[in-house]
Amino acid sequence: MQGWIRPVDFIAVTPLIALDTESFESVVAGIDEFARRWCLSNGFRGQAGRILAIPDSEGGTRLLLAGCNRHDGIYLLSSLPHRLPPGNYALDPRSLPIDPADAALGWALGAYRFERYRTPQRPPANLAVDDHAWDAAHPIATASALVRDMVSTPADAMGPAEVAATVQQVAQAHGAIYREWVGEALLTDGFPTIHAVGRAASQDRQPRLVMLTHGDADAPHVVIIGKGVCFDTGGLDIKTSDGMRWMKKDMGGAAHAIALAELVLTTKLPIRVTLLVPAVENAISADAFRPGDVIRTRAGYTVEIDNTDAEGRLVLCDALAYATEQKPDLIIDFATLTGAARVALGPSLPALFCNRDDVADALLTAGRDTCDPLWRMPLWRPYLSMLESHVADISNSGASRHAGAVTAALFLERFVGESIAWTHLDVYAWNDADRPGHPRGGEAQGLRAHLEFLRRRYAA
């Protein structure tokens, strides 16, 4: 994992003290008088963002002081991998208090860069971590990197087939069962809305539904679903150029679902997991689905297409219907579904919808405890009137711009059995700018919260 090392006797490490203005005096007093004078002569008092090397008698670095913000949680050290000189560092016990596993995870999240297409930059600084911190943080850091890599990869290299190949690799690595329905097989086996959205794409980018299953038949069954729209033109209701520019990230829900399923398998949670990823490209051709078309879904409901750019809920509804048929204990779905969720909550706070209060409360608590916050939004059923159709059972969108995230979630809920607990996370899956621990590009949101929630629910 980039940015980490496991300490061994022959690796030289520089002690690193993370401090702030509040802890500065006590920390430097515990070093020596020279260190205190050196700090003061350099105007360093633990200010966030400042770094100061304390020299040794031979002109080298005896230890390094890094000003941090103690309220940054797991991101306390996240700015340091690319700000410190390349080398190996070990967190000194005199630092601000942080759990070693959290320090390791925050460091890894800050060390990450998407460099598939760029000339390699300088490597990040390394943090020495013990085996316990490695074992706790490594799976989550790896899963987060998978989400970031998938979302940042351009659509020409991350189409439906490549998403499917990623799921197949996970299945092979963990001995899981893999299956997929491609092209006309979607119609044959009853997934008409997935086919309708993706049928306009080229032959090598045919729509598909990808499935992974693993676990004992008598274990609690959890179905994880991710929206895999690998590129979204908007269809015949075409997006503007600005709106289309970043639509390579519209498979961010699929990336989250794949990463969470892999975490379940890696951490060996005692559940039976099914992963469903409807992977399509919403393209434009003579075969594209049209505004005004009516599609009979897998669940039997008819949907009038009001807007071809509201395609994510269409590919999800067949997957949700199929998941409901399995009668699982829980269904979780991730989707980059609506711009309305970003208007309501901004890019960094995913919108959570859930049909069970106890499940929602547990997820919110897990999010707070893992520094991976979510915000619950209401399934306000009176707004179903906004999706009424005069020719079909329901419309995929409506004329009103009000409550767009809510009406999208209400549409999805229509396809979930009332007896089944269900959560839906509307994610942005993207960082518009660099922040410590959040480099610009694809981002994992709610992943740690969901893993911790599943641990507490099924492995406590």
Image: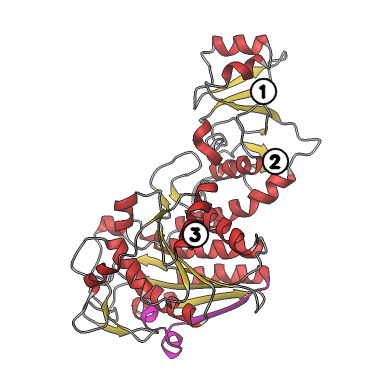
Above or below — where is 304 with respect to 247?
Answer: below
Q: How many marks?
A: 3
Residue 126 x %, y %: 64, 38
308 vs 111, left or right, is left
**Residue tagged 3:** 150
Which image quadrant is residue 266 in?
A: bottom right
Label 1 residue SS: strand
**Residue tagged 1:** 63
Please tell me the numbered disc located at residue 125: none
In-front residue for pair 171/328? 328
Which tag, 2 or 3, sits closer to the chain's start?
A: 2
Residue 186 among those drawn in magenta:
yes
- Which quarter of the image is occupied by the C terminus? bottom right
Please tell me the numbered disc located at residue 129: 2
* Badge 1 amino acid: Leu
Q: Which residues are magenta?
A: 175-195
Q: Nearer the viewer, mark 2 or mark 3?
A: 2
* Badge 3 amino acid: Met
